[in-house]
Amino acid sequence: MGYQVCIDIGGTFTDCLTADGSGDVRIFKSPTTPGEFEKGFIDVLHVAAEGYGLEASDFLSQVDLIVHGSTVSTNALVERKTAKVGLILTEGHADILVLREGPRKGAFQWKLDYPDPYVPRRLTRTVGGRIDARGREIAPLSEADVREAARAFSKQGVAVVAVGLLWSVVNPDHELQVRRILAEEMPGIPVTLSHEINPMPREYKRIIAAAIDASISPIVRNYIGKLRAALDAENYTGDLLLANCVGGMMPLPEMLRKPIYSVMSGPTLAPMAAMVLSDEPDIIVGDMGGTTFDVSALRDHQLIVTPDSMIHDDSLGIPKVDVRSVGAGGGSIASVDAGGLLKVGPESAGARPGPACYDTGGTEPTVTDANVVLGMVDPDFFLGGKLQLRRDLAEQAIAPIARRLGSSIEQAAWGIYTTSNHNMVGAIEEITVREGINPRDSLFVCGGGATAIHIAEMADILGLKRYMIPRYMAGLSAFGGLISDIRREDSRVFLTSDAIFDAEGASAALADLRQKGQAFLDGAGVAPEDQRFECAFMGRYEYQSFEIEVPFDCGSGRLTEDDLPGLVEAFHAMHERIYSIRTDDDVVEFTAWKMRAIGKRHGQDLWREMRIGPDKGAQPKSARKVWAPDEGAAREVPVWDMASFGEGSRVEGPCLIEAETFTAWLKAGHEGVVDRHGNLNVSIE
């Protein structure tokens, strides 16, 4: 077996994790190249080749598979640099994207401007014709309206078209007719149909998903083309898979067919890594990169999937692994506002120009600069000494903050450090408490290059009892990609309830979903023995407005009346866990059915073979002064080398632990023990 590689592009560094047939896993990093992400992709492959003592061509000839988490579509949406979309809707319903789902942002936020729709009204056209909720054609589609819309779009320079007609999820005939006509009137223009991209009954979420998918389609297609060309230029002949936002990988043709699934896909890999690193039921995952701190969670050892991810003022529309992000990365910029209060983020120095201490042109004070000033980070051992940092430039950057606050540079640096920590704590509380997870009963898994410097204080604030610093923490998302499944999620609308349960109809919906999932896995080359399927339904109490997702064991794929009590109890239990209330006497409605097709990849269990040797009595390699706020001065603490630890090695805080790609800070009362995979498991007295 040759090498398997995962490349994850972050705001500051591009991570590359490699695994060979023996189970040896290594991590490599190189600077991210904004605007030319494919260049950074190839650069880090060259760094990996150098790490193995090989020429790039020799290394790539031995790579069987590359999996990749991309931020290209996410960046395009965040920066509003998407393709020009024309939108076709049902006559009389031109304002679906204007009205959205109607909730107010807050009863007392009366100064908010009403947000613009994702597709402006001038690029929205309506067509005659109507399908009802049972799929019956009430009025035929007006072909003349469609052709008139196509002519208007052509004059307006529309690059892509999204189509969202009422009840197309029950009967898609009209949407399919629209695509046929557009192919005649606008040849070569991509068309996204809402019933194909997001088959759900809620009109806004179905149509916003179609609009977003259409708007990023040329961008994703262009990026994949550049990436494929760059790999071809390197004579790479292996496979390439892309991360999706439901916690797995997709082959290129599938991603090109549904590019919306690439949005916010990279951060979903971190919880996938946590899922295999621990068997704990409830896990919090914090991934601190250069630009953001991404936090996710596992509940009952299952990914939390949300239908409510937002891009600016609009929902993404499709379900995705729930990951919350705040501007609290290593490159987050600190400032003092007009009222004299210290702020950290959301602005970031990113990869260009980077923190001041990088000496690459950055002058703004960042979290990384603060960590250097505090003594947390050794300027001579950053990335194992490959990148020399300058403490003097970090101090110069923080000096204006210190003057504004009337403090020493070290005190100002501590203020930046602890403010960043509190920003991250807020994000952690958001995804745990609101999802029925008690942080104090959960295991926290650190990810990203800087999280282990900050987790000790965050743990005390949150009341955590234990946390894990994985051996490959600095590339946790890349590690998640390395061991992730091939995965796809499909859904189908079928409304029934426990009052009059239509088991045959629900079974037919599941059978259809199983057929689609089976075709996807077969097309991806997944052997039958490596295929599995997970089921869930969207449910609500009869008079509720919104549903929750409830997993269930679909077994053979057929449901009977005997299965109903188990489905209902599963809904009550999940509702109680999330909202702390259940009403067993209320009617439970089942609105949609979901199936995740999951294919196990060959070689993804290599990590299980990773085992370090036994403890050989590791000793600190040095000592370093770290700022102690309680004492108002720096104090000396031992510094340990992570590479010297063996299985069973123990270390007690206060101390620093250095690896080639990260540094960890343990406070007093924090004790770590190394497991057989080389992960440091820390418990707090």
Image (cartoon, helix red, strand yellow):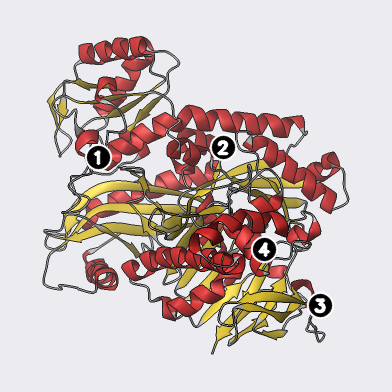
Tell me: residue 588, above or below residue 247.
below
The residue indicated by pointer 4 is 372
Label 1–label 3 contact, CB within 8 A:
no
Q: Going from the N terminus, do you reach mark 1 or mark 3 first?
A: 1
Label 1–label 4 contact, CB within 8 A:
no
Camera-side residue: 71 or 406?
406
Q: Going from the N terminus, do you reach mark 1 or mark 4 first?
A: 1
The residue indicated by pointer 1 is 204
Identified by mark 1, the residue type is Tyr
Q: Residues within 10 Å of mark 1 (few under 14, many from 20)?
A: many
Query: In front of the other: label 3 or label 4?
Result: 4
Q: Going from the N terminus, do you reach mark 3 or mark 4 first?
A: 4
Label 3–label 2 contact, CB within 8 A:
no
Q: Secondary structure at mark 3?
A: loop
The residue indicated by pointer 2 is 252
Determine which of the numbered discs, if any, sits on residue 608 in the image. Answer: none
Q: Secondary structure at mark 4?
A: helix
Q: CA distance from mark 2 to mark 4?
A: 41 Å
Is 365 left or right of 419, judged from the image as shown? Answer: right
Q: CA distance from mark 3 to mark 2?
A: 47 Å
Camera-side residue: 74 or 370?
370
Percent x, y of residue 666: 62, 79
Q: Going from the N terminus, do you reach mark 2 or mark 4 first?
A: 2
User: From this viewpoint, is residue 135 visible?
Assistant: yes
Percent x, y of residue 641: 77, 74
Percent x, y of residue 53: 88, 51
Q: CA distance from mark 1 to mark 2?
A: 28 Å
Identified by mark 2, the residue type is Leu
